[in-house]
Amino acid sequence: MKRILLRNLLGLIVAAFWTLPLHAYDPNNRTEYLAKIKQAEAFYKEKCEKVAGIKIYKTVPDVEGVLLMKIRPERTDRELADPMWPGAAFGEEYYGDSYLRSFLGYEYPATGPIDPQHRGHIHTDKRPGGLPGYRWVEVIDPKDGQRYRYKLEYKEVTHISSIMIGGNGKPFTVKENTLDRTPSPLRASPRYAVTFEDHVIPEERALWVASSTVKVLDLKTNEVLGEMTRYAISYIHSPHYSMPWLNHSICPYLPGGSGTTTRQFTDQILIPKREK
């Protein structure tokens, strides 16, 4: 019994520890506070000027689908408050199934035409005026090592009406685009792939700076078709934030939705095939 109580107590201590943001300085010490802010901002600025950026070496038209070599994993408040969290540079990006949907969805303009300087927002519903995403993506399931294909399928889905927002708690059916998974019909891997490498560098993270690189690959020729290296700096001058990696500045900035950055970088290189 004592051992169980001790284990539970340690669990509560760890949970309480992670509910607060971590800082590499004492924000109540004004001198240390200002010095650390100055150091962090100078470091971030230099990386933005000399390292961060987008490089496109080659573009490919009429691409139907891609292999996603990695998927942004689920994250909680704990990860968003952890200075060593690998995915910190892409703290706002969609994860899990939503990451897959971002590659399959349609892009709709916010204002004016869509171009590299004026991007729209990604939605899974199809309506006039949108540009299509990829028709499918493939992912290797780490549980069985098999490759699966994901597509959007327009079909009937049953939901429960939420009483919290004025519903009656009863089921209702609507038609919507859902994520459909089947074994890959291809024997060989798709030619084009997308991956990312999150960098966990202690010197950067001590300043609440994070970096990551997204790469678009041609697996047939072993070429890197394009890469984007991003840096992010948390608003460490606002220590009351409990999720620092949702409150940060990034470079380079890519127009479009903050949750679909990787998709909207990839489709500048692997241009999705238009529908007839």
Image (cartoon, rainbow, N blue to C red):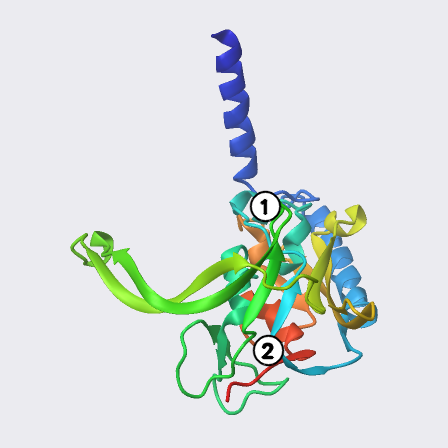
* Residue 224 occupies quadrant: bottom right
Task: Indicate the quadrant where residue 197 lies.
Answer: bottom right
Q: Amino acid at mark 1?
A: Glu
Tell me which corner region of the image, top left, top right, bottom left or bottom right, holds residue 63.
bottom right
Does residue 132 appear to the left or right of 49 in the view shown? left
Q: CA distance from mark 1 to mark 2?
A: 25 Å
Residue 181 in picture, x, y percent from top left:
49, 58
Whether residue 251 can be seen here: yes
| Figure label count | 2
Q: Position of residue 228 (x, y in %)?
A: 73, 69
Mark 1, other Cα within 10 Å: few <14 / some 14–19 / many ≥20 = some
Q: Secondary structure at mark 2?
A: loop
Which of marks 2 and 1 precedes in the sequence?
A: 1
Residue 79 shows which numbered tag?
A: 1
Reading the image, the residue beneath label 2 is 255
Residue at 51%, 83% in the rendered image: 131
Secondary structure at badge 1 equals: helix
| Disc sitting over residue 94 in the figure | none
Q: Residue at x 66, y 44 (%)?
A: 23
Q: Residues within 10 Å of mark 2 (few under 14, many from 20)?
A: some
Q: Residue at x 55, y 85 (%)?
A: 274
Give 51 or 267, whichever is nearer the viewer: 267
In front: 174, or 5? 174
Coordinates of residue 226 in the picture (x, y in percent): 76, 73
Is 244 left, or right, of 32 in this rendering? Answer: left
- Tell whether 176 sits left or right of 21: left
